[in-house]
Amino acid sequence: MSRFRGLVLIAILVVTSVVVLAISEVSVLGFTRGGDSPLGLTLGLDLEGGTHLVYEVVPEDGREPTREDMEGVRNIIDKRVNEFGVSEASVQLLGGGVDSVANKVLVQIPGQTGASITLNFGANTVGAETLEGFFQNELGRPDASVKENDNGSLTVQLDDIQAEVLDAAGNVVISNEADAWRDAVIAQYPVALQVGFVVPQVAPPVISDDTAVDPVPTDDIETLPTLEEVQAAFASVGRSDADVDQVDGAEGLFSVLMYGLDITSTDDDGNPILGEDQRILNALRAIGRVQFTSSKGTLTQWIEGGGVQEAKAVIGSTAKLEFLYRECGDALAPSGDIPWPPDGLSPEEWASERCTNPAYFTETATEIDPADLDDAFPEISGGAIPRPIVTLVFNDKGADAFFEVTDRVSRQGDRLAIYLDGEELVAPGVSDGGISGGRAIIEGGSFTTERVRTIAIQLRSGALPVELELIQERNVDAVLGKDSLQKSLIAGGIGLTLILIFMIAYYKIPGLVAAIALVAYTIMLLGIFKMIPVTLTLSGAAAVILSLGFAVDANVLIAERTKEELRSGRSLLAAITAGFDRAWPSIRDGNMSTIIVAIVLFWFGDRFSTSVMQGFALTLAIGVLLSMFTAFFASRLLLRLLATTGLGNNPNLFVPVRDQSNTSDSVAGGNS
């Protein structure tokens, strides 16, 4: 009975491994394994392709970095890269020896080569296949491939993005290829808007016999905008092409279909401007009380470079946060004899320029210490049109200072300018008094999901204790990686097939059992690699093939020991049991010595930052441990099970070909 329970256990493990490998992406207990690679395995840099970055540490004060400094650098970079979402990045220290401290950092980012664009449409109205076809067929980029990210955004992977596109005569046709693509994408996919106006509530008249009711003046009755007025509002901002319809049965509700909606809130020089969505909203507010607006299909995110380029910026940057008090230009004229607004600006222009144009405002330091910032994380704001924001959390000291500054901003009608690394993030006003509680948000019209995540990572990770200088950047071609992987798989498949044929032809029943055990071993090994996960490199693939040899060696030892026991006159079941018992010490000692060597290799690889050695050692150790299980446990159960069937009546089926006659004589003599 225990024999059958063991076989059921093995069958469950094999079937589970098959299911794990058959599903490209497995989600269990909150963690996800797998991906688009073959069998969903995690591939290393030499198989998948990617970027190889080496940074040299440059101490700010001229002193040599300590081990603590370098470990801090490694931890911060590892945190930044992994929080950024780059899959299976490797961060290691280089250059250290027995008596010296490592002064370089190696960052390997698999799967991040070439150029990329990350974009997002409202409500996922455009799929990955649709956008990929548009880039390949309409924009003439057959190298484009598009994948959908977890947050609903789409990433277009390209070989490159040209800064300028020239014609045959060498003239510049397109100054920025990505900008032209963005305009084409905006013009290609429609945006569906819905606008709801507040329906006026008119109190019903009170009618009685003794009370005269005066009629309500017509001018005091608030009316809903008509279809013609809404169409005129869109035309007033240059969008007479918008297809506006009133929703049947819904008073004050209009649907709009339009192409080319651009929500960019800064010009080419980085100056703030009103996006087209904001101009449309202002025009709608001029004709009625807007209750809500919603949109589907709006291009809300467009990030060039993505992946490696932005990750590189995150790795080496030092976040410097500043809170400055911005005293805006006077809203009213300082005196009656001064022309106001200045410089011939209109009142509307002055309302925007007085707090955004450096010529009209001054900035001074505040009491807010950036060191009092405890946390920063990205969120999505509520409201009719959700927007990405960064939430800041201050400690008690920072909360008090933040309240005092925001209270002053609120009373004076000025702004609180927030800078990151010398660049303005946002300069908001405060309308409801000082902000208490130590929590605040940073928001901006140009913020995207990726942008606020990057800012949050920089602020939360903190400043690096040293400066980093990028001294080496090398891209590993993904085509070569796929070619290497394909050849490795072919070599492994051919080798495994030849092994199985030899074992069955030469060792017969023990060979068949060994073949079944090897197939089960291979399936379970790949399942383990996927679920841990183990990053499979080219050296790791070599270790897998080598571990197959160890598994075969164990089965050969078992078959030979069983043959010797049959020669001595034992019965078949007794010979199998004794053969396994006598072979086990050799299998154990040989495999344990290999595992010890793998541990030493892994230690040296970690000590001297040799990822190839580490990958080989880890893969070999896992393979050898599993081969011991399949060779001794699975093979033993299968062989004993077959011996109890009709095959057990012919002992010659359990010994090698060249030893059949000798074994038959020995068995016959023993039985007599």
Image (spheres, rainbow, N blue to C red):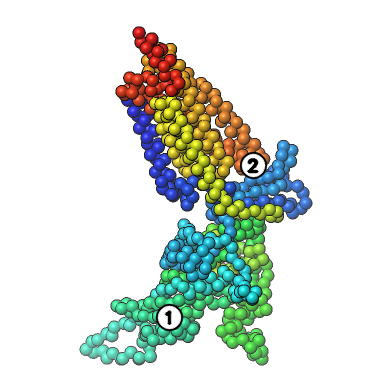
Callout 1 touching callout 2 (CB < 8 Å): no
The residue identified by callout 2 is 610
Residue 193: x and y in percent read 41, 74
Whether residue 638 is visible, yes or no, is: yes
Q: What amino acid is at disc 1? A: Ala
Q: Using the image, determine if residue 122 lies above or below residue 596.
A: below
Q: Residue at x 63, y 39 (%)?
A: 605
Whether residue 395 is visible, yes or no, is: no
Q: Quadrant of residue 229?
A: bottom left
**Towards the viewer: 305 or 575:** 575
The residue identified by callout 1 is 242
Q: Quadrant of residue 565?
A: top left
Q: Residue at x 42, y 35 (%)?
A: 520
| Nearest to N terminus: mark 1 or mark 2 | 1
* SS under mark 1: loop
Q: Quadrant of the C terminus?
A: top left
Q: Using the image, determine if residue 418 lies above or below residue 486.
A: below
